[in-house]
Image: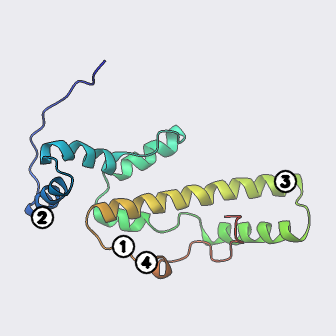
Amino acid sequence: MAEQLQTVSVEVSEPIYRRLQRTAQLTYRSVDDILPSALNVALGVPPDLPTELKDELEAMGMFNDAALWVARESSLSPARQRRLHQLNHAAGARPLTAAERTEQTHLLDEYQRSMLRRAHALALLAYRGYEIPQRADLPDAFPHAPSGSA
């Protein structure tokens, strides 16, 4: 069964329209053809994410630019970052207790969600035409993460 299409009239700024035209030319398509794809990219998130995280990332597509710049910062507090570092360090020196493993798993999950939010915010900003800083210029949310653990 084919999806039902809706016609929407939208006003866009001249620079955005020029970008759409340029993309259409490069892909040998019309602006009408590429606009739905562009919207899917701007609004889309991976479908296999937990519902809560998927909803959060989809909502970020509606953030204004200032809110996206804030969202690119780590949401993991410095105290929680230090604790994760301590647990990772301890895990390299000795077996963790069951409680420590549970805490480490929880903190790693928080860290990974924070990184996903940050990456999504940067992707949206790049899509909106902002120059995104190089990796070396970005603030490091977790500078002491052992390779492979976070």
Compared with 10, 130 (above or below) is below
Query: Residue 48, position in %: x, y?
Result: 52, 39
Mark in the foreground, 3 or 1: 1
Whether label 4 touches label 3, CB < 8 Å: no
Name the residue located 58 percent from the left edge and 64 percent from the top edge.
Answer: 76
Q: CA distance from mark 2 to mark 3?
A: 54 Å
For mark 4, what is the residue? 134
Q: CA distance from mark 1 to mark 4?
A: 7 Å
Dot 3 surroundings within 10 Å: few (below 14), some, or many (20 or more)?
Answer: few
Kindly identify the amino acid type of the residue bearing the numbered disc 3.
Ala
For mark 2, what is the residue? 15
**Viewer-side residue, 68 vs 125:** 125
For mark 1, what is the residue? 132
Q: How many marks?
A: 4
Q: Earlier in the sequence, mark 2 or mark 3?
A: 2
Name the residue located 91 percent from the left edge and 61 percent from the top edge.
Answer: 95
Q: Is residue 12 left or right of residue 59?
A: left
Whether label 1 touches label 4, CB < 8 Å: no
Whether label 4 touches label 2, CB < 8 Å: no
Kindly identify the amino acid type of the residue bearing the numbered disc 1.
Ile
Q: Secondary structure at mark 2?
A: helix
Q: Which mark is residue 99?
A: 3
Whether label 1 touches label 2, CB < 8 Å: no
Q: Earlier in the sequence, mark 4 or mark 3?
A: 3
Q: Secondary structure at mark 4?
A: loop
Q: Quadrant of the N terminus?
A: top left
Q: CA distance from mark 3 to mark 1?
A: 39 Å
